[in-house]
Image: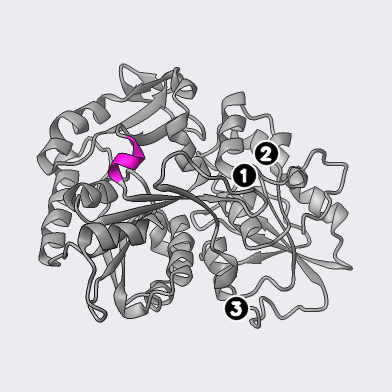
Amino acid sequence: MVREFWLQNIVGIRKKFDKYMRYFVVDHPNQLPLALGDLNKRKIQRREAILVVSLHSHWKNIDKAFIESFFSKVIYLPRPDFSWFIPKHFLYLLYTRVFFKSLNIERNDVFYCFSACQLIENLIVSTYKSNYKELIVPESVFGEYDSKKKYKDFKETSLAKIYNLAIYPLFGMYKTKRLIHKDSLFWGFPIKAYDGGKTHMYKDDLSFIYSCIIVCKNINQPLIRHTHSNVIEEHYPFPALLHKSAKLWEKELKQNIIFLGSNFIGESTMKTKLYVKYLNLCLDYLRKFYNEDRYNLFYKKHPAEDKEIDYLNLEDFEILNTRDSMEIYLIRNSTANVKAVFSVASTALRSSLNFGLNSYVFFQLFPFPKRTLEYYDNLFGRLPKNSYVKSFETKVKDIF
């Protein structure tokens, strides 16, 4: 592996009992399962692992005690982002820089990164250029860097230009591209946001920034060898995280069907009334093909969901009142009695598939704009053909 070669030939061969710390750098909570999977796969001991969290707003509902059980220490940092409150976010970056200097990072310490160019990760990888740094990301994230033609109708925001010219140089950070579709910009200012309407990436090639890049692919996809020697494909390391003997629910006589909710109010490309209409058709579909005599129907709320359930017909569904992400929920419990997982277009659906569950998406049946449909196709990677619900009148086939 590139990692071992780098550690031996650049850092130098260490004595048998030399220790070095592994820092796992995450931003959004949906990156945490990848970090835990990577920790498990490498058989890294708890005392040698530190989790660095850039506090995305979705972290407020995460069970921190559960997360902290996997690491010797969890560092929670304020989350700098693109904002016109520039002094505030400048101070966040300055605090992070000073804080990391106080940790006395050694040259043989290792960084495992999961959020690509988010500002905290950018600051870390640009500060510790001589350390080994591994990027572990879904195929969709890696693919952004091979999609230049895809962004011909996108433009960089005025704020992103300011960061590249005035903020990043002060910290020696890598420059990035914050691109917004031109139909969402007015004089360089974003006026609306929707899935598929924005992206954020480094201006430099990933292979220049990271020592090794692990590209995670769906369980059904073949792995290929890349021309770049430091790019390696692997399947998502989720199954080993499951507790096979744990009970997911008390109702064991029936199999469970889970529908993953979304925080669609103000977040969808469709008007709420139209989105709710199609979402209720999805729920009707599950009631029709998975009747309560044989199955338990569960609606799992999105961690950021608030009043969305008030708009939905959830007759026959039991609401799972947990703020855990789907990935953490499965890790803490078991998949043994889950028949299938459904979603409109949740990234947790991709995770469910890679945990080995029958997983299905409805988004192709929604009247989304073409650009949003293309975004979802890229986001999920190449799902099995049976993962796409093709009609509200036809029951899907099992994947596993």
What kind of element bears circle 3? loop
The correct choice, above or below, for 1 with respect to 249 in the image is above
First-in-chain label (2 vs 1): 1
Asked which secondary structure carries label 1, the reply is loop
Q: CA distance from mark 1 to mark 3?
A: 26 Å
Residue 73: name its quadrant.
bottom left
* Residue 318 versus residue 251 in the image, above or below: above
Residue 77 visible, this orientation = no
Circle 2 Cα neighbour tier, 10 Å, few/some/many (<14 / 14–19 / ≥20): many
Q: Give x and y (percent) for residue 38.
A: 45, 64
For image coordinates 82% across by 66% down, the residue present is 295
Please tell me which residue is depicted at 47% across the width and 60% down the height of the picture.
Answer: 34
Please name the residue that numbered disc 3 is placed on: 243
- The span shown in magenta is 205-209
**Image check: 273 left or right of 398?**
left
Q: Are marks 3 and 2 in contact (CB under 8 Å)?
A: no
Specify the label residue 363 is tagged with: 2
Q: Which residue is mark 1?
A: 345
Q: Is residue 275 left or right of residue 204?
A: right
Residue 275: percent from left, percent from top = 65, 37
Q: Is residue 208 magenta?
A: yes
Identity of the amino acid at label 2?
Answer: Phe
Is 127 one of the magenta-colored residues? Answer: no
Q: Quadrant of residue 175?
A: top left
Q: Main secondary structure of the magenta part?
A: helix
